[in-house]
Amino acid sequence: MTEKLYENNSYIKEFTAKVISSDERGTVLDKTAFFPEGGGQYGDTGYISGIRVTDTQIKDGIIYHITEAPVEQTEVNCTLDWNIRYNRMQNHTGEHILSGVINRKYGYNNVGFHMSNDEVTLDVDGKLTEEDIIWLEDEVNRIIDENREVYCIYPEGDELRNLQYRSKLDLTEGVRIVVIDSVDMCACCAPHVNTTAEVGLLKIVKHYNYKGGTRMHILCGDFARRDYRTLSEQNTKVANTYSAKRYELCEVVERLEKEIYTLKDQLRTLRSSVIESMVQENGGKGVCLYFADDFAMDELIKLADRSVVLYPDALTVALSGNDTDGFNFAIGGANAKDRFADFKARFNARGGGRDMYQGKVQSCKNELADFFNGIS
Ligand SMILES: [Zn+2]
């Protein structure tokens, strides 16, 4: 069994140890401050005598450091990626405070916990409202500000049996209980910060119903501060672009949405009159051929429909696009079925339809014009 230095002192960043073995399963030391993956938290990373440790795992009480190369020394100096590990400690302790408060106030249990490199999710087995979430955030941050002590106890026998704590286990010995003074007790093997103030800040960034309960995405400590910086930078950028004040961005977006809606409406009206004059100007003899530079498919169909109505005895061909990207087309009117079949065969066009044939063709304007003008 590897001696777990992180259990009694979660602040060890550097240590020396003896190498027990080093093979394809990983490097085993007599003692380690590297926390192995477990309970929703990734394994620690860092260096063993300059060799990169990419992961840490535990099996039957033996901790395996996954290294990029075998470790050949017998005595080694080890260093943790301390920033990553400390952020995880801040977030894990923040999660305990939140789960503890939820359990006391609502009686819900933590039924899922996962911590990635920039996000923490927490699932509880009960529904929380918007007001609950706001209350919880305030309550947790109040406890953070109170700078309460966080420590571990190892009760045994009856004391352990009778103790009320979260994640209660059936064991009567060897249970590590993380205590947050007057707030929470929970069985947990992970390293934590020593005081609640070190959590810094807790923010519930997202919450929604999940498997009959609630899933929350939370950020603590440095995760939360980095999130605040990013949001603040984005806010300032948008506010400067639209000459808005810091807290007025929703109004700016609403105003822009209205403007877009009005402009789209005006564009639709304008397009309709453009379509009408294109069709009127065509005259409608033999083949009515239209090239529209930037029409969307629905506008192209509108154009073709109007042309067919006005000139039912002619073949209508409406195209939009360019020589590089190809052309969208709508073909209708007299003999449309046969003409479309010829066109499809000649240009290898994709598409189909009934009465009005539509699709896409890769060709150039001159060839398409020659082909359709040749029909009449
Ligand atoms: Zn825990």
Image (cartoon, helix red, strand yellow):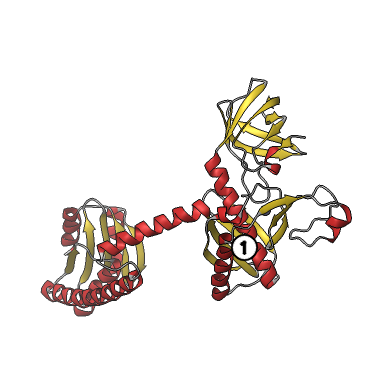
What residue sits 60% from the left and 63% below the top?
Answer: 143
| Residue 208 visible, this angle | no
On whether ligand 1 comes within 8 Å of the CB at mark 1, the answer is no
Is 127 on the left-hand or right-hand side of 187? Answer: left
Secondary structure at numbered mark 1: helix
What residue sits 25% from the left and 58% below the top?
Answer: 327
Q: What residue is pinned by disc 1?
A: 98
Whether residue 46 is situated above or below residue 213 in the rendered picture: above
- Circle 1: residue type: Leu
Whether residue 137 is situated above or below residue 345 in the rendered picture: below
- Of all residues, the one furthest to the right in this rendering is 158
In depth, the one of 129 and 11 nearer the eye is 11
Check the picture and name the quadrant holding the N terminus: top right
Q: Quadrant of residue 166?
A: bottom right
Q: Residue 83, percent across and down?
A: 52, 43
- Callout 1: 10 Å neighbours few (<14), some, many (20+)? many
Q: Residue 52, percent across and down?
A: 56, 30
Whether residue 81 is situated above or below residue 107 in the rendered picture: above
Is 319 on the left-hand or right-hand side of 174? Answer: left
Whether residue 104 is situated above or below residue 81 in the rendered picture: below
Q: Residue 225, percent across and down?
A: 46, 54
In depth, the one of 104 and 121 nearer the eye is 104
Check the picture and name the quadrant holding the C terminus: bottom left
Is 343 on the left-hand or right-hand side of 31? Answer: left
